[in-house]
Image (cartoon, grey):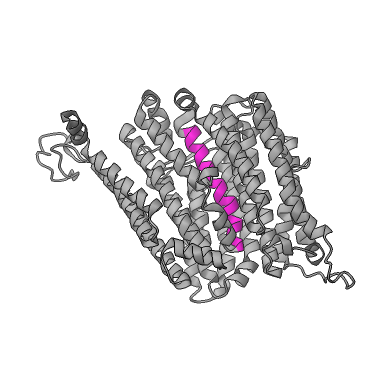
């Protein structure tokens, strides 16, 4: 049992990401309501964003601003003292992509509701069967 | 000037995509000339790039002057240049063809359509030139978002088809991003060339293997490889005609290009053959895709849906060629051939399907009676494409199948030879049905009356159909004469695959 605790706490960020990702994937595949599918999609994207952000952190590291840093006059810049900014920058772009995808998905949902007057997938499919 | 070519190819359609939308507030007449101008510039730039690459080898372009691995690098080698010309040419042809059908199918929203269309082409060209894994993800999403919107403006069930594509496409893109994340954790780099150098000491690592599998499945969804193809038939069927033409050719082939690039350029042959039986799995999946896609196609009454399932089978052919690549001295040659051949053949077929909708409003194959007399030239284009697809010598489809069979025999995979012959039989069955209804079956009710008057689509739609129809034969002859051999062997060599002319 203590081994399990160690396994989980040592890489807690990865476990959180895996759990969130599975929640999102489950909602996208298994939920019948289209809005719930989109919510699942957003959870999946957020999981990946959190995963990327978590890999940029370091113990006892500060924000990666080199100018006016502590002791800059006397010491050389040590990368180990600063959090890795690159994953944050990547995720800034990924967030924009996620927002755009969400916007398109919601626009499609509005159109679907106008067309079929429901957002339950089985009811839409039943209407398609009748035609 | 020539130094800036890799970025000009991508930037021109991007900038003009916004200009198209802005200028339409002032006058709508400027929309289409702008689109043609953008695509022509891209095509010319791509041609000059190919010439430069053939002369001096790989061209590197550092965006913003930042050297890789810190900055984003655009990298053009033989494979990129070949794909750039292919996609730019297909986009131009599809635009010329699409003008008439877009005005008929989407009155009043023409400028929005062309704006999105150019955005899609920007993404495709960007995926081809980029040498950066994360940049590829962003451009993949540019392509996908433009694709969702373009499919959704179709009529009928287009919105539902688009929504399903959005859900599956997002899962695919997320899997790709996870794979890129694992690679970044292990190596600290996102540049493809840099990764190729940094990865060999880590080949045994589980994280790298997981990254590879995530990326493979992500792209499997995007290229609609058989068990992951669920979104594809609906999307191709319900999209507007001009959109079906471009997403079934340029978009599908670009994504296959990206898969090949990552498999062979980033992970390399050494990693895959040493660690995972990926090529065996790809061959098996491709064989299933070829047979299943053809079987599904037989049961379709909707012409566009039949073509969509035929595309599932043809993606199988290309993936089969990838799976055979390390086993034979032919390397990727059959795959490269089929990327070009199938793009041209399928473009012709989807253009004809759009022409039937434009002129007669017909999508059901059973109602195609007498179309050969009503639209003789369009039907002739379709016949050329069908003969090529089935594999009549010396057409393009024949050359692909010939080389695939040679490669399979060389690798001693006799079952795969059987699969190729069997799928050809199935193709004959479902395409013969179309030909029979169009040409042979006589209209029983009005057999005494005169043949229906000729009522063809306008020249702007007819010319691309006939051009691609004739190209399906010409390209086959070009392959046989070996004009492309230096290009193909250079691509094979760059991937570490032994090439045989």
Name the spot of residue B462 as percent of width and height, x first.
73, 62
- Say if residue B15 shows up in the picture: yes
Question: Is residue B446 left or right of B299 when viewed as pictured?
Answer: right
Q: In which quarter of the image is the C terminus of chain B?
A: top right
Q: Tell me which residue sits at (39%, 28%) in the image.
A: B199
Tell me if B230 is positioned left or right of B245 in this view: left
- Indicate yes or no whether the magenta region holds residue B251: yes
Q: Point out residue B489 in the picture as x, y percentages from the top left corner.
A: 62, 31
Q: How many numbered discs sit on the rendered protein?
A: 0
- Image x and y of residue B297, in percent: 65, 50
Rendering quarter of residue B50: top right
Main secondary-structure element of the magenta-colored stretch:
helix
Dividing the picture into quadrants, the one containing residue B193 is top left
What percent of the width, then of the height, locates residue B33?
59, 66
- Location of residue B25 with respect to B77 vertically, above or below: below
Of residues B90 and B359, the one drawn nearer to the viewer in this rendering? B359
What residue is drawn where x is 12% and y is 34%? A75
Image position of B230 with respect to B216: above or below: below
Q: Residue at x 59, y 41 (%)?
A: B289
Task: Specify whether B386 is left or right of B60.
Answer: right
Q: Give the range drawn in magenta.
A: B241-265
Location of residue A32 with respect to B287 vertically, above or below? below
Instruction: Check if residue B160 falls in the magenta segment.
Output: no
């Amino acid at each position: 049992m203590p081994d399990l605790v160690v396994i989980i706490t040592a890489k807690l960020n990865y476990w959180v990401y895996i759990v969130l990702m599975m929640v999102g994937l489950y909602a996208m595949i298994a939920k019948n309501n289209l809005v719930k599918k989109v919510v699942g999609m957003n959870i999946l994207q957020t999981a990946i964003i959190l995963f990327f952000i978590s890999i940029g952190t370091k113990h006892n590291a500060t924000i990666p601003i080199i100018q006016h840093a502590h002791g800059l006059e006397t010491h050389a810049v040590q990368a180990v003292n600063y959090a890795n900014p690159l994953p944050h920058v990547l995720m800034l772009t990924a967030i924009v992509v996620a927002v755009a995808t969400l916007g398109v998905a919601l626009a499609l949902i509005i159109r679907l509701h106008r067309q079929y007057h429901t957002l339950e997938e089985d009811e839409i499919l039943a209407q398609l069967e009748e035609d | 000037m020539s130094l800036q070519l890799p970025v000009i190819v991508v930037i021109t359609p991007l900038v003009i995509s916004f200009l198209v939308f802005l200028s339409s507030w002032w006058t709508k007449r400027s929309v289409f000339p702008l689109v043609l101008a953008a695509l022509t510039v891209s095509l010319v730039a791509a041609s000059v790039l190919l010439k430069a690459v053939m002369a001096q080898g790989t061209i590197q372009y550092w965006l913003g002057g930042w050297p890789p691995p810190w900055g984003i690098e655009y990298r053009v080698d033989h494979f990129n240049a070949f794909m750039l010309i292919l996609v730019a040419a297909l986009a131009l042809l599809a635009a010329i063809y699409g003008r008439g059908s877009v005005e008929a199918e989407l009155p009043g929203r023409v400028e929005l359509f062309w704006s999105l269309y150019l955005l899609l082409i920007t993404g495709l060209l960007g995926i081809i030139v980029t040498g950066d894994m994360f940049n590829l993800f962003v451009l993949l999403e540019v392509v996908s978002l433009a694709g969702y919107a373009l499919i959704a403006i179709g009529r009928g069930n287009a919105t539902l088809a688009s929504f399903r594509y959005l859900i599956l496409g997002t899962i695919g893109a997320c899997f790709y991003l996870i794979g890129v994340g694992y690679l970044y954790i292990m190596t600290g780099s996102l540049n493809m060339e840099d990764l190729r150098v940094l990865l060999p000491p880590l080949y045994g690592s589980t994280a790298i293997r997981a990254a590879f599998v995530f990326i493979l499945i992500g792209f499997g969804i995007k290229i609609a490889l058989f068990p992951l193809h669920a979104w594809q038939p609906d999307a191709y069927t319900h999209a507007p005609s001009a959109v079906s033409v471009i997403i079934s050719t340029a978009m599908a082939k670009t994504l296959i290009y990206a898969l090949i690039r990552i498999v062979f350029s980033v992970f390399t042959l050494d990693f895959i053959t040493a660690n995972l039986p990926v090529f065996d799995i790809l061959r098996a999946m491709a064989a299933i895709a070829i047979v299943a896609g053809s079987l599904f196609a037989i049961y379709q009454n909707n012409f566009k849906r039949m073509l969509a399932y035929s595309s599932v089978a043809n993606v199988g052919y290309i993936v089969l060629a990838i799976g055979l690549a390390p086993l034979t001295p032919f390397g990727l040659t059959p795959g490269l051939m089929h990327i070009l051949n199938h793009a041209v053949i399928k473009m012709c077929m989807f253009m004809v399907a759009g022409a039937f909708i434009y002129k007669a409003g017909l999508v059901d194959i059973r109602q195609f009676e007498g179309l050969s007399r009503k639209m003789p030239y369009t039907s002739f284009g379709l016949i050329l494409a069908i003969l090529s697809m089935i594999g009549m010598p010396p057409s393009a489809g024949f050359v692909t199948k010939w080389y695939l069979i040679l490669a399979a025999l060389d690798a001693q995979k006799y079952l795969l030879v059987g699969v190729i012959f069997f799928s050809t039989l199935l193709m004959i069955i479902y395409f013969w049905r179309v030909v029979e209804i169009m040409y042979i079956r006589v209209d029983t009710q009005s057999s005494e009356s005169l043949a229906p008057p000729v009522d063809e689509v306008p020249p702007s739609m007819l010319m691309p159909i006939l051009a691609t129809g004739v190209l399906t034969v010409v390209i086959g002859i070009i392959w046989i004469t070996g004009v492309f051999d230096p290009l193909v062997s250079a691509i094979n060599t760059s991937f570490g695959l032994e090439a045989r002319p």
